[in-house]
Image: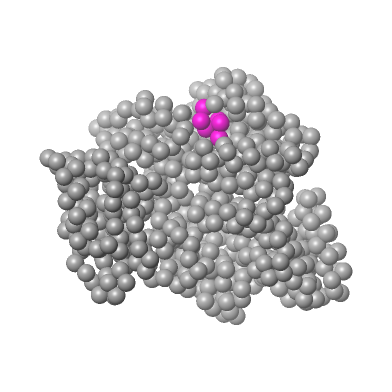
Amino acid sequence: MLTVRLLGPPAIERDGLPLRSPRGRKAWALLSYVLLAERPPSRRYLAEMLFGDADDPLGALRWTLAELRRAVGDSLALRGDPVVAAVEPGAVVDIHLVTREFVDTSPLLDIAGELLDGMDLSSTPAFESWLLVERHRLSGMLEARLRQAAVALLATGRASEAIAYAARAVASNPLDEGNHELLVRSMAMTGDRTAALRQIAICEDILRRELGIGASVALRDAASTGVDSPLVPALGGRAAALSQLEAGRAAIVAGAVDAGLQCLRRAVGEAARCHDTTLHARALAALGGALVHATRGRDEEGSIVLHEAIELATRAGDRATAVTAHREQGFVEVQAGRRTTADGWLVKAQALAETDEELAAILGVRGMNASDRGDYPAALEHLGASAERADRCADHRQQAWSLSLLGRAHLLRAEPSQAMAVLARSLELVYEQRWMAFLPWPQTLRAELDLAAGDLDGAADGLEQAWSLACQLGDPCWEGMAARGLGLLNARRGEHDTATTWLAEAASRTTRIPDRYQWVHAHVLDTMITTALDRDDRDRARPLVTTLATLAARCDMRELVVRAHLHRSRLGDRTALASARLLGADIDNPALMTLLHDSAPTRTKS
């Protein structure tokens, strides 16, 4: 069996024994690029990117392809033009363990090191930029796979096995409080409360030392509470479980979140005690959805609960509950910027879905994921289909939600007429439904359109209303977007110190909870950098660019990766503009294409 290792120091093995590596670092670079490319690259493109400094770039490419064939044989063949990688059954490529879904997740625990670890490819700046982005992206994907495995094990009562995956996730990204919470829950569920409390202390120290923030209540609660907490008393059978389920749903809708969660936890406990698998699954799905949407900082617990709901609903043949729980799991992953695992959950949900209502909700989340990623054709298709299905089944809240995201996509593509039309309809539906908890989002987007059109008074009215309502609701996403808009408004007025204050407030609001919406976080960072560079405040911009570049790459937000490179170009990086154009070539956004075309590298000031 052939094994190709590209994560860590690259190597080739057959039946566990090392083989001769191909000569030249660019052979490994070529192999990695072809295996990870979204679509097969042409030979000319590869020759220019990797061998542009050679006398005969295409000849150098042919020699390198031949060298790879000598090293790996027919088990992993690179053929044709464009170049396609064909991996024979039985051959193992370690990056596929990260990018694809497998039943056996144990090999994930053995992956150590980043893509092409230790290799210096600075002589090919375009490839070096691609490699840096892919290292962050694969690291984020590995973390997502480890987390997913840990959650699955916790949900099926195998907490002791979950510890290893949660610990590797912590090692992969120790600044993510959610990873620590998974590890704490795993330890607590094995009965090792001492270890759980020790891990909480470790997390608190890391967050305080590295980020200057405290840990959330959810982390501390993870050591002692769960859906089967002894604090939930027995009530009296199936009827009581149904009563508590309905009461919990009603309380959540009415905004009485704490009371609603208490009722839903009772419903879960009572359904489990009366051994009604279908009711237990529905109660878990309701509780998981409430933890994700109605509370702040509870996505880790919600994800575990939803996974358990999927297990029970599948066992009971409850298709509708399985659809809901799969979709909610996908939503959690989308907000966290874990694109591949999000797609996995949402594709499964769509395969199970039958009704317009189910498909409208799933397609809405798929469109959100595609838009965050920078795949606008897919986003427009999914969101348009979602809004149409929601209209057909009179699910007007879903219709408003999907139209708002459709408006965001048009806004980002600098298509104001299309954005105005769908946002106006979204706002109309929000007011009709009296959905005040959602209003700040489309209101902020509409105000940004007013700002772009030069209507500063109209933008100010919308943004101030959105900010006030967002603060009343306590929603960090809405607060961050509205504060960002107020920062842009003040920058347009020439009140730059006030603009800087608002943008700092936006950044603070979007990051105050561990389960933040990463796209909003990155969007705010991008705006902070742009306004700082417009004032030639390079000292403020430089560390923010580093943060944005890492976050965008790790969360596969491709347009924001490109924008980070454009910011680097403005800071004087002479290779950054070429890298931005390389990385942005496949992003279908007219506004970004204009920006790339009009950008020019800036000389670094002495």
Of residue 380 and residue 76, the one placed in the foreground of this image is 76
Is residue 411 in the magenta section?
A: yes
Residue depicted at x 60% and y 57%: 348
Point out residue 527 in the picture as x, y percentages from the top left corner.
48, 35
Span of residues in magenta? 409-414
Location of residue 274 by image quarter: bottom right
Query: How many numbered callouts?
Result: 0
The reply, left or right, for residue 68 in relation to residue 363 is left
Residue depicted at x 29% and y 75%: 16
Scheme of image coloration: one colour
Residue depicted at x 67% and y 67%: 314
Is residue 92 in the magenta section?
A: no
Of residue 498 and residue 487, the one placed in the foreground of this image is 487
Q: Is residue 467 something that shows in the picture?
A: no
- The residue lying furthest to the left in this view is 55
The reply, left or right, for residue 106 in relation to residue 65 is right
